Amino acid sequence: MELFSPTFWLALLNVVFIDLILAGDNAIVIGLAARNLHPSVQKKAILYGTGGALLIRILATVVVLWLLKVPWLLLVGGILLIWIAYKLLADQGDEHNDVQAGTSLWTAIRTIVIADAAMGLDNVIAVAGAAQQHLVLVILGLLISVPIIVWGSTLFIKLINHFPWIIYVGAIVLGYTASNMITEEQRLLPYFTEHPTLRILFIVVVIAGVVFAGYRKRSSSSSHKGSDGEQQRSYS
């Protein structure tokens, strides 16, 4: 991939979009960790904590980029990314009550960095796959998306809640990235190169499978919550 070519910019847009789609939990963690601090200190905690988390995220992604060059790990990464794409649709929003609010600047910074590192595996794998093992894309993508996560996370989350189809677009992008990773595994690449139609079919099946399974899980969870709510109202 040529630097700053149309393909490069398209891949960069893909990296930024994936990071933003998967940033909901991270934004919540940042808010919870700094919620008990004075407003004047909150900004410092969010800024320094996010900076530390960004540094760790870049280092972790570099490690994953290197690991993806090991035979068969591109296949493993693709399979993990399929699971991440499914979870993006299937999850109805986990509780984050276990994230303790910091009582001092450095406590909040530490909480943000540790929690982000623990929760950021999906972002790291997804960004590494979308960057097509291109280090410049990883760094640029994270440098663009992280400030948006910090200062525009609330707006982005509201946008997703208001337009649920954005989540489906994200799942489709992740499904494509995952299936593309698998087809580019060095042990499988010759086979898919000889059969381009099969490669396209495989990508379509993966994307359709992710969207269908995620939609089914999302629908069943919503109906289950609705029936529980009706039962509670009938008892009251």
Image (spheres, rainbow, N blue to C red):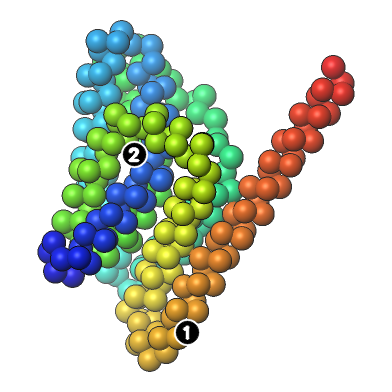
Tell which of 35 and 203 is nearer to you.
203
Q: Position of residue 231 (x, y in %)?
A: 83, 29
Residue depicted at 31% across the width and 8% down the height: 38
Element marked by disc 2:
helix
For discs 2 and 1, the disc positioned in front in the rendered view? 1
Residue depicted at 78% across the width and 32% down the height: 228
The kind of residue tagged 1 is Leu
Find residue 110 and report its image quarter.
Answer: top left
Residue depicted at 46% across the width and 32% down the height: 158
Q: Going by the image, does 35 lie left or right of 6?
A: right
Q: Is residue 104 above or below residue 82?
A: above
Q: Position of residue 143 (x, y in %)?
A: 20, 43
Q: Position of residue 192 (x, y in %)?
A: 40, 84
Find residue 135 and report its image quarter.
Answer: bottom left
Q: Position of residue 61 (x, y in %)?
A: 27, 52
Element marked by disc 1:
helix
Tell which of 161 and 81 is nearer to you.
161
Q: Is residue 26 above or below residue 175?
A: above
**How many marks are shown on the rendered structure?**
2
Residue 58 visible? yes
Residue depicted at 39% across the width and 82% down the height: 188
Name the image quarter holding the C terminus. top right
Measure how far apart labels 2 and 1 are at the Cα level.
37 Å
**Mark 1 surroundings: few (<14), some (14-19) or many (≥20) residues within 10 A:** few
Q: Is residue 234 above or below residue 203?
A: above
Q: Which mark is residue 117?
A: 2
Which residue appears farthest toward the left when viewing the image?
A: 3
The kind of residue tagged 2 is Ala
Name the image quarter holding the N terminus. bottom left
Q: Which mark is residue 198?
A: 1
Which residue appears farthest toward the top when viewing the image?
A: 38
Q: Going by the image, does 132 lie left or right of 95?
A: left
